Amino acid sequence: MGGHLNFNHLLFLGHGALWTIGLSLIALGGGGLAGFVIALARVSPLKSVRLLSAVYVQLIQGTPLLVILFLGYFGLAAVGFQLSPLAAAGASLTLYVAAYLGEIWRGCIESVPKPQWEAAEGLALSRTQRMMKVILPQAIRIATPPTVGFMVQIIKNTSLASVVGFVELMRSGQIVNNSLFEPFAIYAIIAVVYFAMCYPISLYSQRLERRMGRGKFNLAPA
Amino acid sequence: MGIELDFPAVLERWPNFLGGAILTLELAFFATVLGAFLGTLAAVGRRSHSLLIARTCKVYVEAIRNTPLLVQIFLVYFGLASIGLKLSAFTVAVAALTINVGAYTAEIMRAGFDAIPRGQLEAAEGLALSRLQIYWHIILLPAVERVYPALTSQFVLLMLASSVCSQISAEELTAVANYIQSDTYRAFETYIIIAVLYIFLSLVMRAGFWGLGFVLFPRRRRLGTPL
Amino acid sequence: DLLDSIMQAKKIRISTDLAIPPSGMMDGSMKATGSDVEVAQLLAKDWGLELEFIQTTGATRIPNVLTGKADIIISTLSVTAERAKVIDFSNRYATLQSDIGCLKSLNVKDWADLKDKTVGVARGTTQDTTLSNMKDKELKIARYDDDATEVTAAVSGQVDCVGTSATIINQIGVKNPARIFESKIPLATFDLAVGLKKGEPRLMEKLNGWIAENIKNGKLNAIYKKFHGVELPADMRG
Amino acid sequence: MQQDTPATSIVSLRDVQKSFGSLKVLDGVSFAVERGEVLAIIGRSGSGKSTALRCIDRFERVDHGEIVVCGHRVDSPDVDLRALRQDVGIVFQSYNLFPHLTIEQNITLAPCSVKRMALSQAKELARKVLAQVGLEEKLHAYPEQLSGGQQQRAAIARSLAMQPKVMLFDEVTSALDPELTAEVQRVIERLAAEGMTMVMVTHEMGFAKSIADRIVFMHRGKVHETGPASILTSPTTPELAQFVGTGDLKS
Amino acid sequence: MQQDTPATSIVSLRDVQKSFGSLKVLDGVSFAVERGEVLAIIGRSGSGKSTALRCIDRFERVDHGEIVVCGHRVDSPDVDLRALRQDVGIVFQSYNLFPHLTIEQNITLAPCSVKRMALSQAKELARKVLAQVGLEEKLHAYPEQLSGGQQQRAAIARSLAMQPKVMLFDEVTSALDPELTAEVQRVIERLAAEGMTMVMVTHEMGFAKSIADRIVFMHRGKVHETGPASILTSPTTPELAQFVGTGDLKS
Ligand SMILES: Nc1ncnc2c1ncn2[C@@H]1O[C@H](COP(=O)(O)OP(=O)(O)OP(=O)(O)O)[C@@H](O)[C@H]1O
Ligand SMILES: Nc1ncnc2c1ncn2[C@@H]1O[C@H](COP(=O)(O)OP(=O)(O)OP(=O)(O)O)[C@@H](O)[C@H]1O
Ligand SMILES: [Mg+2]
Ligand SMILES: [Mg+2]
């Protein structure tokens, strides 16, 4: 116990940072796909589908990610589904991210002006064609900045995956701190590393927003 | 792989859960009120003609938005103590949450400000209103009305995020849950209960914001149309 | 049963929190070390098994064995009747002496002197439970998520008293020579045991046999002394 | 869906009624459009002109009455919408070009997706319809690179590419300044000369006078007066007289 | 700030120049408006009409030249903006009513905030100016509940409530249909009859002809021709002749 911050500690933190990046990518990939489905479900012509997806979004957005992760890993195991930590974290993050991205994207789909829908309808395009060829290409442009902005939140939120045994950046910092008891130095380093990962993305998203000439904003499921 | 769930064993601690839930709501309430104020100031500051003020506000917003809340809480809690300021965990938690949500509020409010058409501002200037009067009458209220759903979501997220305050000895809902589950080792029951409680709390908050909006925006109440 | 499957797999998965020094922690080259870590290593070696540490946090030690993600827990589990309703405990393999430690300059001799002081503890530990149950003593308790946060609180001056093991109390002064802490009032001695899922009598029997043997040959005491600086109680020194 | 309609009548409305909530917007509207005819619908704001036009292309569902368009029973709940809209082209005031596609892509989208036309053939068609509206050189521009009048002409070209049997126009020039208005009007005149059947809502009286074979004057959800363009100069009802009177104030 | 100006001249511009970046929008504009006079500024799109008007109320800063309005040296950097704007009322094409306030609140806001008028007195005033524009019954409506013409009249009432010495109008009717245009024009005519000094940018030639005491025709950032309303029927420059020609196309 005790001792001073050395290269090995930094290496350990670096390893944690890699996990943070990896988990973020998994969350974004899985959550992106599922979020797309949620977004489509939220604007579905079927009322039951709309309602169901709305309930899903409300439930997930009302529950802390920590609890989702816990129930996803241990809860599923308790009813007989043994998932590896990676699969469980991936699944939980996917569920979580999907709810948020789904909401963001629904907003973007709905913000395509109504006359565009009508113009497409007037050209005899089918609903799928309208969606794929007219609405989504426009929605994607609107959606890019807030989506990129949301990535920052994902990066920070992966820290909760420590509950299923991941030693990502935040947890590795805690472990190092618990043998060194140097909270300022260590948390300052962690803050800087997170900042270094997040700020370029924030900046990029702001740049995109500015280029699109509209002030979108992103929420912080901190 | 059967796990026997014994909810009564955990539910008999309901006074603890209740206490935790109330503290969580209290944290959320104070941080929301103060954070809304701080965030609005920062949003106004970012539009300031003084480069120094505008930059400072930007640095504040970016530094907070790009680092985890937990780190911020630690730095405030231990930082203040190291310079001899011994505040209660509750005070520190409220302060840290305020600083955190203030940054997000600032971004949302800024978007709201930007959405006010230029013509509105010119019309107000043409009526000889002062800068302060324009901010108050023409910018602030419509901006808030416009971004109200985003603000609501942000403050609900704040309530959920307040769980990390358990780390600095604030006995909010997650802290209570951790205590109970390590005392009884009944983690599943505990986590399921707090999941339900958090969902309930977030519904309570949304209802509260809905009611507040009802009072705050008479136009919307009467016409039901978005601004 | 579980014992057979462990033996067949030639591997034992042990759930250990590596962020609670000095029982589980990382050394300067970021290798797992600590008294619980060495106990686990000794067990695996004696049984001729490969060892896998399942990283946990305080909150997930128990769910890990309940859901079969780990075989046993060696992670400063102290035995209480309440907890025994959920998992089985082996016989004790160590004890944990905890004290109320305060700033050296503070005049604290007995419980009465603690009246207006805030005592820091790690949340949900048996120290926490013990202190929380002393309703008559009118203590103010500040609960932190783990020992490290509690120590940091003491180092930075958020609290002047802590309820934890003597080893950790001494650590505070090392980190901040301006705030030397010392043990003031003995709190309790807890038995530490290996935790396992209910209904595994054969594994339990084998564990108890192994513990008895290593108490007798003094190995457990040696490990304990190496990390905690003190010896186990007289009847556990072999 | 095929129905007996008077041989030459391509659009016919009979006693069409439509309410939004408690507001009765169409209160028994009947008129018919013959093949090759140009019909102008005029009337003051809120009189139900746009709603009537939108009912023809089934953007609104009627509450009561019968609408037959190119043999499609539009009022029936199970009308084949996509078949209907292949026969009908509609152009709105706010051009509604798809901003993410070039003009050529805007035009080829529907023929390729709906009619499964080969891309090369669709491109040929795009060139042809753009020539019709005098915009050949803008094939590869994006909508935002065009002026309002050019955008509106491109929107007309896009509709033409589906080779509709009837075209509907809803105040297609009212967002344009006089100079651009003239451009678009010339295009529509040429279409009329080529024999296209058209129904247009407009508030440009001069234009209505010069191009329409027949005028329908709507007032409070009803067809108040109908007749040849000459009714604009010699109205028989006081409402039309007043409407044309105020309309004149604008010049 | 007070200055020697010709006794009756309430607005005067002398050699005003203004560029946006490299684009010279006003290139030496001079004209003056006497007390009680109605001046109409006409000219094609982009000729600098709006910019000239905006310079008068200091929404744009001039690069060169002198502007005096009700004794305020508007071109000076330290003009008292709020005092200037109490003397000048301005109304834009896009009415810019405050959407979150009722019409009454829209009108009372400035008198209460700027002139510290008592609320009851301001409400009395609101009633009075709304009566002037014929909108008494809309006191408690929100802007979106009014038609475009009503919104524009409410915007005029809001300006009137500050009891300005001169009113500026920038194409206040161009977003309106003929009927609503007529409503607003009647209100402006009444104001003119009551002796209000007004400067208006308009493209309604008929209206300009009927109400303006004097016309300023702007062309490429310069005052190209100026004179009584009769110059519209007998222009002396080819530019004005051409402009009046296109203007007629609209009718
Ligand atoms: N989707 C809708 N929901 C409710 N009311 C509607 C809807 N569409 C139109 N209305 C109302 O129906 C009435 C007639 O509208 P419509 O658009 O047909 O008039 P219009 O004659 O085209 O007028 P304009 O010249 O202003 O375009 C109006 O009072 C309008 O407010
Ligand atoms: N803020 C600005 N920045 C840059 N250019 C501007 C700005 N405002 C106006 N302009 C340009 O100055 C020129 C004159 O504009 P102005 O609005 O005065 O014309 P206008 O005569 O009012 O035309 P319109 O009849 O179209 O309103 C135009 O070319 C316009 O693009
Ligand atoms: Mg219409
Ligand atoms: Mg202009």
Image (cartoon, coloured by chain):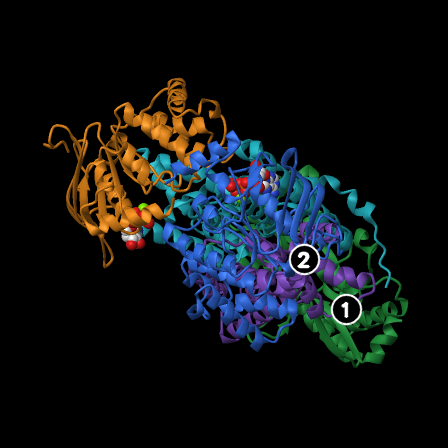
Chain colours: A purple, B cyan, C green, D blue, E orange
Residue displayed at 21% across by 42% down: E234
Q: Is residue E4 above or below residue A221?
A: above
Between residues A28 and D174, which one lies in front from this camera angle?
D174
Q: Is residue B127 above or below residue E19?
A: above
Query: In the rendered image, which quarter contains the C terminus of chain A?
Result: bottom right
Would you say B159 lies left or right of E139 here?
right
Would you say A71 lies left or right of B117 here?
right
Between residues D98 and A190, which one lies in front from this camera angle?
D98
Labels 1, 2: front one? 2
Query: In the rendered image, which quarter contains the N terminus of chain A?
Result: bottom right
Between residues C32 and D186, which one lies in front from this camera angle?
D186
Three-letter amino acid code at disc 1? Ala
Identify the element where label 2 is drawn: helix
Residue to which mark 2 is pinned: D84
Residue to which mark 1 is pinned: C70
Question: How far across and down, in percent of the image, does residue D15 sit?
Answer: 69, 40
Question: How far across and down, in percent of the image, does residue E144 sit?
Answer: 50, 36
Residue displayed at 12% across by 28% down: E7
Would you say E104 lies left or right of C47 here?
left
